[in-house]
Image (cartoon, coloured by chain):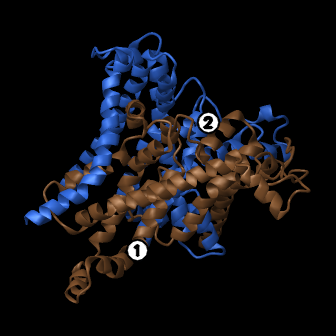
Amino acid sequence: MGGERLKIILSLTPPLLIIFTLFFGGIFYGFLQSLGYQPAIGKYEINFSAYYNVMFSERYAKLFWTGLGLNLWVSFASTFLAAVFALFGALAIRKTFFAKTICNFIYSLNLPMPHLVVAVGIIFVFSQSGLLARFASQIGLIGSPGDFPVLVKDKYGLGIILAYIWKEAAFFFIILMSVLQSLGENFEELAQSLGANRWQRFRYVILPLVMPNLFSASIIVFAFSFGAYEVPALLGVIYPQMLPVMAFEFFLNPDLNARSEGMALSIIIAIIVMILVVFYFWLTQAKIRKD
Amino acid sequence: MNNNLKKINIYAIYLGAIILILPLIAFFINAFSFRWFYPQVIPKELSLQAWVRLKLIPKSGQRTFEGFIELWASNPAVIKALLNSLSIGFLVTIVSIIIALPAARVLGLLNFRFKKLIIFIMVSPTILPPIAFVLGLNINFISWGFSGNYFGVCLVHLVPIMPYVVLTMTGIFANYNPDFEHQARTLGANKTRTFLLITLPAIAPGMVVAALFAFLVSWSQYLLTFLIGAGKVMTLPLLVFSTASSGNPALTAAISIIFIFPAILILFFTSKFVSGESGATSGFGKI
């Protein structure tokens, strides 16, 4: 058995080493820096003043709390809407119809598309001189580009939400399609033969069956959109600003003291995401116990 | 009534498909048009201007085979970024597969103490956002001398890739029967031959998916490359981002088309394998 144990340890060490030194090491060092420990500029004290500054100081408090609000709004709205669109898309597309394969491909097309490109695409389509504004002007809905609503680089994060919906709907779609495929149509046919109407079949048969997968995919999407940088950096405004962009900008600030605040922000983002994931596991575990 | 509903359903799907494909259409119009002014929907003149300015296509009159070679040999920024992206992607993919292979085998086939904990540690980089570790890591990399060079960028790309490769390949090994290896060994095959003739063919399909996926994750990495590369390692996503921020739609569209081409290609080849059960799929949401 000793040989097997050695084999396990030797096999697992390289990937664990990478994750421990680079990932956990990075978090740990970031945490140290957020506490004000910065040997590079001769600061060795440890305190929570960076956290206090970010959250409560007159200078940053407003920026932080509006940013947090925007973060929650964007992540909730985009996760929910992407899931809803994908659910209806997946349910509708199961039937056979003309050009089904092409539609299926288009619906999954955004899956491998980098977020960065999706963000650029949203600018091309939804900006005030974008494709939609041009259509609207052709059919006489609007005159000048200024008449088109501000959907990109707006203070409500609409452009960011649109980009995440575009991208993550494809992700939900793939997951839902495979769940629905593995379920088959037996349950629905059974419900139909028992007299359930369209809505009842959806509400009491399909929804409970896809919910576990839909929910775990939602957690992934929510956690991602909460901490991602590229999309809000391209489609956001300076105020209110999403937290990852704010953290990054603090970090790049030539004033080295702002670094601690940037690190503190990135740790706060990580803690919020972690709380969410733990809550999710607690919820699913509790449900398993109940069942 | 039911028939009407079905029709509405199908039209809704077509409409959804058209809406979803709009950005892609906009990319192509922007990249191949010249002075596409508002409110034109269809550009008045098509042009390769953006591609000429990016030094990807020679000026008209020089579009011969030699013209192309000469232009590309002058090492324009896009070609340089493309080569960087490709080589980093390939290198990181190969390294991650080599590292993940033994670990995935152990995790997939054996049961031991702390296995759940180890899997949890392995996947933790997929849960927490990259900004949580890369800011701290950046300072470490500067003091280790990994910042601002090719090696450091490759190293940091391993962090988001490792979990998916390990996870996908663990899934493969969980459905793998090692008895065939024993049979080969008892029949006299040595370790290398057994691996090449028995193990590799059995895990190859899954490994290809893991590799393509690893490549895609590296390919689309922006934040990690930007911070660790410190502006010295230029890749395609960095070029897309900076061109998009500077606000030239034609150039941005042209670079983006080059950038998304492999992504669509990979989807085309892997769509058969991509399903909700695969460990890799969960990563697609995060590219």
What is the residue that sits farthest to the bottom in this orientation?
A: B187
Side of B187 where B206 appears, left or right:
right
Q: Position of residue A232 (x, y in %)?
A: 56, 35
Displayed quadrant of residue A180: bottom left
Side of A118 where A290 appears, left or right:
left
Q: Secondary structure at mark 2?
A: helix
Side of B247 where B121 appears, left or right:
left
Note whether A1 is above or below B194 in the view shown: above
Note whether B24 is above or below B127 in the view shown: below
Displayed quadrant of residue A42: top left
Q: Position of residue A27 (x, y in %)?
A: 33, 34
**Which colour denotes chain B?**
brown
Amino acid residing under circle 2? Leu
Q: Is residue B113 visible?
A: yes
Amino acid residing under circle 1? Ala
Q: Nearer the viewer, residue B243 or B67?
A: B67
> Which residue position is annotated with label 2?
A235
Q: Give the letter of the chain under mark 1.
A: B
**Which colour denotes chain A?**
blue
Displayed quadrant of residue A185: bottom left
Mark 1: few/some/many CA within 10 Å (<14, 14-19, 20+)? few
Identify which residue is drawn at 60% across, 60% down: B262
Instruction: Check if mark 2 and mark 1 are on a common chain.
Output: no
Camera-side mark, 2 or 1: 1
Evaluate if marks 2 and 1 touch, with contact meaning CB atoms under 8 Å apart: no
Q: How many marks?
A: 2
Q: Residue B204 shows which numbered tag? A: 1
Identify which residue is drawn at 36% across, 76% down: B200
Q: Secondary structure at mark 1?
A: helix
